[in-house]
Structure formats: structure tokens, C-alpha cells
Amino acid sequence: MTAGNPARTIEKSLSETFGETAHVDAARYDAMYAASLADPEAFWRDQGQRVEWIKPFTKVKNTSFAPGAIDVKWYEDGTLNVAANCIDRHLATRADQTAIIWEPDDPEEAAQHITYAELHRRTCRMANILEDLGVRKGDRVVIYLPMIPEAAYAMLACARIGAIHSIVFAGFSPDALSARINGCDAKVIITADHAPRGGRKTPLKANADAALLHCKDSVKCLVVKRTGDQTSWVDGRDFDYNEMALEADDYSKPAEMDAEDPLFILYTSGSTGQPKGVVHSTGGYLVYAALTHEVTFDYHDGDIFWCTADVGWVTGHSYIVYGPLANGATTVMFEGVPTWPDAGRFWAVCEKHKVNQFYTAPTAIRALMGQGEEWVNRYDLSDLKLLGTVGEPINPEAWNWYNDHVGKGRCPIVDTWWQTETGGHMMTPLPGAHDLKPGSAMKPFFGVKPVVLDPHTGQEIDGNGVEGVLCIADSWPGQMRTIWGDHDRFEKTYFADYKGYYFAGDGCRRDADGDYWITGRVDDVINVSGHRMGTAEVESALVAHPQVAEAAVVGYPHDIKGQGIYCYVTLMNGVEPTEALYKELRAWVRTEIGPIASPDLIQWAPGLPKTRSGKIMRRILRKIAENDYGSLGDTSTLADPSVVEDLIENRMNKG
Ligand code: WTA
């Protein structure tokens, strides 16, 4: 399931198909890319003009990756407001244009078309409500909502008054939620009664109630009505959004923000410890989200753009809300899932809303591929012009299926490699400029200088046909600025292993043509259905169970999810492994973290392979989970080699 497989190159070059309309053709890409590296100041000064500044910037780039002095500042003396950029400045020409098409979970329920004028009113009202609740510039607001328009209003309302939002995916548990509320010391959490998804309902308000038991008493809870179901209510703490919105004023003045003021915090998994709060900026982030949205997707005025992600992930931030709205686009927001009520839902929505650009994750494509192409063929997909993928390497089978059945061989596929930390696309083929190779992220985006390093020496590996760890040699405007409350950890995580570079945590190959292939994470982060999961998080959830003595978690290849979660669990002395305990541990992890962290396989391990100094040898555990125990490598440092034989004998992944 890696992108390293030999792949057929699509015969026809995109420039032949799209040369006429594409924003960037091959020659233009080469020239612009070269210029962006030769003179970043000039390139990004120009690009900075795509947003509207209250006070124009005079400084463009002030960045350093030097050890001990990591600092990233872009457009630092400019001021602006992100909500004004995403809404107000479009009103003169687009007041009646649809900004957001909202498609509910249940296809029987009516879709909504929210115009830019309506988006303005709704966002202003939400901004005024937040101010009524005491939220001020610089305060943090946690958003824990379904995929409903109010999620976008809430994000933009925070941006409008200069509050910093931190969205928590609605699939996370109360424990994960309280950790994030406390982590950023939020003043308010915005939630809804329930989140409908795939015909089922998640009790968001009840989860928030449970989370708030572990938070400061002063945290207020703003509740949006989604399903109308009864929920419990704490007077003085809970506030009814729908009631307050009736009274709220239709105008709120956009706050003047510094380019470097934080726009949002988004927690993401790392290889060690608790999730880290990735901090993104106001100016640089917006420029980068807007530019990548326009260029990568070849977005043209009037196009209908659909990114199927959830706003709980960075993809939803950059390519449902900020990038598209900054460009005055029409963006689709979908509450449901690809397989409910049936496996044709994505394509039904594409047909219904005449979607032009469609952006999804390989895991969704694999799941739908398994249901057969008849689901795709039922719908008219002739409005589609371009397809995209994100989140994990796409295997050539899935790529070809997507290309043949969804794109009918006429839509370029942009395989976009990027991360929560990067704010926007870092590598992708550009439609009209590049050939496509199934599974390859192809070329760096403007201003991005990827390098392949030798993992042992840390030296750059020049030339083509090489493989190593992927680093970026210089800053770009969408780069994260710090980890909330822990700048040290920011330096240690991204700049300590390879001095002078941003270390992405991924491995990569540069093929004979100089095109890039992401080979997957090289750290203890696994990618489950396109969602990042730190194995350390699952381990600490498991060992929190009273009957678990020790746990080690690794990824293994999974047909649909890309990677599955494989857990080795050592029970407390005297505890018998039973089917009931197996189920209980799976449920336990779901409760501790959320359904996305649910273990796929649990192996009872009487002991774990350790070095004599007591370090768990994960390399060996990974091999066993991958069913590749024939090549365990050097096991001479094991304290007790018999442990490994037992694990191999009782491995769960026998196929
Ligand atoms: C992986 C999602 C291969 C990668 C935007 C990265 C990919 C992690 C691709 C970031 C791709 C993302 N090809 N791998 N096109 N896109 N990844 O922070 O391992 O949720 O480091 O951001 O996903 O995941 P995150």
C-alpha cells in the first residue's frame, strides 16, 4: 500500500488536455517555480496582493531554520482580517452568489444555498454572540460541531473578532475534547445537540457535558440546534445559539489583526506524547490557502468546488473554508458519509450540485471501489473537470479506478501531499503543467524546496533515483508558527533531527525523472483512513485500563484503511485473556480517544521484545504485524529472544 510501486505513466500529458484553460502550463510552472526559489521576497510580495490588507505589509519574509533560533514570520508588519477577506470584500460583486452549498446527511432533507450576503449576516451574528459571551481578541474558542454551516460561521466569527479557534473533530470522545479545551484554555465551546452522520446520531452536547466536568467552571457552552432532540441544560453555563441569533445584530466590525496573530490552533498526533496544538497565522496562512486552492485545483470563477473532508481536520480548514472563500468560490459542505444511504452518495451529490472539482481521500476511494463501479455509473458526472486526493499515499489500483470510472479518463488527478503543519499543499502535480503518475505527488508547489536526506548522516542526497527522508529547506507562508504553549517542542519535533531543515516525518523517493513519491511516515505516527494517529496515544489509552500491564501499538497494511491499528497487549499478572476482554479493550480505546482509534487487531503478548536496556523493539513488532517476520533483521540485542517466537506463533494477521 505504498506509493513506491512501479506505475504506468498516463500517456497524454495534461497540458494537451488542459493547456488552454489551465492557470499554469508547463513552461509557466517551470518559470514561476524557479523564480519562487530564486527570489522568494519578490514572489511572495506579488502573491501577498491576493488578499486585502488593512495596513499593507512592507516586509515579506523573515524566517530562520537555524538551530536554536527557529523563527517564521511572513508579512509581519501588515494587518488584515480573515473574515473580511473571505466575505466582506466579495460583497460588491458576489452578494447573491452562493458561497456555501450545504448537503445534509439525509438526502431527503433539503440542501441549503448560502449566499455571500447571508454568510456575512450569519457570521456577524455569531461574532456578536461570542462577544456577548465575553470572547475577546486573542481568546480561544473550541468548536465541536457537525458539518453544518454554523461550523463555518463559527470559524469566520472567531476570525472576525480576532479570537483563535480550535476545532475538535465531532468523532472525538469527551476525554479527547476536555484535553483540547484545557490545552488551549478555551473560554467558550460551541457545540450542537447531536451530529447526524450516516443515519446515526452522535450526542455532541452530552459529550460536551461530560468533557466540561473536567474543565474550568468558567467555560461557557454555546449550543446550536441541529436535530432538535432534547439535551440536558446547565443554566448560566449553556447558551442557546438559535435564540441568541434572533436577537443578535447583523453587523460586527472586523478586528484589525497582525499578519502573525494566530488564526487557529489544530491539535494533531505526533510520534510521542499528547497531541500537539499546531498554530497557524493570519496573513501567511490565508495567502497560502488561497493560492494553493486556485492553482492546484485550477479553480475558475463560477466553479463548484467540493472537498469531502471534515472541518475537524486541516483539509477542511484550508479547502472547505479559508482557501475557497478567500477566492470567492462556491464551496460544498457535506454532512454525511460516502456509503450512506448507499455507495452512490458521493456521485449523487456531484450530480445534484454540478460539482466541477472533487477532492477526497484514498481510503474513501478504496471503500467505494469495493462496492463496484455500477454505483458511479448511475450518475451524470459530466460537470467534473478535476479530481484530487489527500491524506495518504494512493495505491495505483485505486488511482486507476478513480481515473477510469469517476474521471472517465478526462479529469486530471491532483495527488496533494501536505500536512496539518504545512497549512496547504506542498507537492502535487498541477493540472495543465505536469504528467501524472498514479501514486506520485510529482512536483513541489511554488516556493517549496524539498530535499531528500540520508536518514543516518542527515546529508542531502542529490540527483534522481534516490530515496530517504523528506525535509523542506526553507520556509513558506503557510507553515505552522509554533506548538501552542510549547515552542521548545516545536523546535524539537521539526528541526532537531536534521539541522537547518523542516523535517516532515515522511519518507520519500525522487524517481529517475525527478518526480516525488511519498513512501509513508518514518516515525511512530500511523495513517488510518487518512487520519493521523500517534501509536503512543493508543498505547497510553490501553495502559490506562486496570487489567493492562503494557501495550505496544504499530500499523499494518489494511485494504481499505491504508493502515490498521495492531496492538500487542500484556495483561496484569493473573488476568486471563478472554473474548470479552478483547471487546472491552476495543470499546475502552473508543471511549478514551474516539472511534477512529479503535484497534483492528489485539494480540495477547505474554512479553514484548525489548533490548537489554528495556526499550521496546518496535521494528520487530511492525514486521510481525505486517506478516513479514521472515526478515526480522538483527535480533541480537534482544533481552529474551523467545518472546519473539511466541509473538510470531500467535500473530493475528495471518493472511
Ligand atoms: C500523509 C493531511 C502520501 C503524510 C493534509 C503526511 C500523504 C500526513 C499525502 C499528514 C499524499 C498526506 N500522499 N501521503 N498525497 N497527503 N499524507 O496532518 O504521511 O492529517 O505526513 O494532513 O498524511 O496528515 P495530516
Image (cartoon, helix red, strand yellow):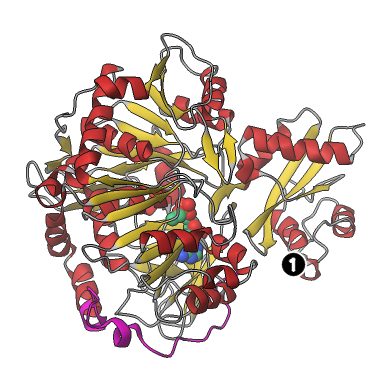
Which percent across, then down, holds residue 520? 55, 63
- Looking at the image, can residue 120 be seen? yes
User: Residue 434 lies in what quarter of the image?
Assistant: bottom left
Q: Which residues are magenta?
A: 1-28
**57 left or right of 219 in image:** left
- For disc 1, the neighbor class at 10 Å (few under 14, some 14 to 19, many from 20) is few
Residue 565 magenta-drawn? Answer: no
What residue appears at the point 19 percent right and 63 percent down from the top-left corner?
Answer: 40
What residue appears at the point 31 percent right and 60 percent down from the top-left corner?
Answer: 304
Q: Nearer the viewer, residue 329 or 535?
A: 329
Q: Nearer the viewer, residue 206 or 483?
A: 206
Q: Amino acid at mark 1?
A: Gly
Above/below status of 329 relative to 374: above
Which percent across, then down, holds residue 431? 32, 75
Above/below status of 182 relative to 276: above
Above/below status of 357 relative to 336: below
Residue 25 magenta-drawn? Answer: yes
**644 left or right of 402 in image:** right
What residue appears at the point 84 percent right and 46 percent down from the top-left corner?
Answer: 605
- Looking at the image, can residue 496 be seen? no
Above/below status of 139 relative to 49: above
Please name the residue that numbered disc 1 is placed on.
Answer: 633
| Secondary element at image label 1 | loop
**185 left or right of 555 in image:** left
The image quadrant where one finds the N terminus is bottom right
Q: Residue furthest top?
A: 235
The image quadrant where one finds the C terminus is bottom right
Which percent across, then down, holds residue 174? 57, 28
User: Residue 302 lies in what quarter of the image?
Assistant: bottom left
